[in-house]
Image (cartoon, rainbow, N blue to C red):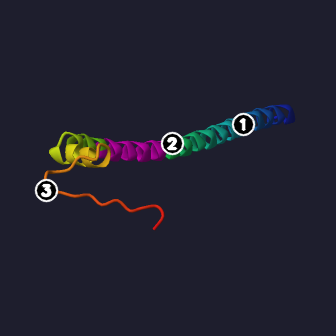
């Protein structure tokens, strides 16, 4: 083989190597970016799951409150505290401010 053909083959091989290395570098950068996005999405998912659990607990508390507000115990408590009503044989003592 002549020296010109060897240089031509070596040049082509070098060109292919450069292209392959550039492709690998680009793919590495893309993989890194995707990994960062995946980490961000995982953190967001955890945050949303926590919010979901908090809202589920809050909904349960509201259901309990709604059930309590429909009971006669709630009506009695409101009548005693806000209206000052009592049963016929019941007396309520209030603390004086000056004592």
| Residue 55 numbered tag | none
Q: Earlier in the sequence, mark 1 or mark 3?
A: 1
According to the image, label 3 marks what residue? 89
Residue 25 in the image: state x and y as whole percent. Answer: 69, 40
Which labelled disc corresponds to residue 22? 1
Observer-side mark, 1 or 2, equals 2
Question: Residue extending furthest front?
Answer: 98
Residue at left 20%, top 50%? Answer: 86
Task: Say which residue label 2 marks.
Answer: 44
Position in image of residue 4 (x %, y %): 86, 32
Q: Which of marks 3 and 2 is nearer the N terminus?
A: 2
Where are the magenta residues, as a range? 44-61
Nearest to the eye among marks 1 and 3: give it. 3
Cα separation between marks 3 and 2:
60 Å
Q: Is residue 79 above or below residue 2?
A: below
Q: Quadrant of residue 40?
A: top right
């Amino acid at each position: 083989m002549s020296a010109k053909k060897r240089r031509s083959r070596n040049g082509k091989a070098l060109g292919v190597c450069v292209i392959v290395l550039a492709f690998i570098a680009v793919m590495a950068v893309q993989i890194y970016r995707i990994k960062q996005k995946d980490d961000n999405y995982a953190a967001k998912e955890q945050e949303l799951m926590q919010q979901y659990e908090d809202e589920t607990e809050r909904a349960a508390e509201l259901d309990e409150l709604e059930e309590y507000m429909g009971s006669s115990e709630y009506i009695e408590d409101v009548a005693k505290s806000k209206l000052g009503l009592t049963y016929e044989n019941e007396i309520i003592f209030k603390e004086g401010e000056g004592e």
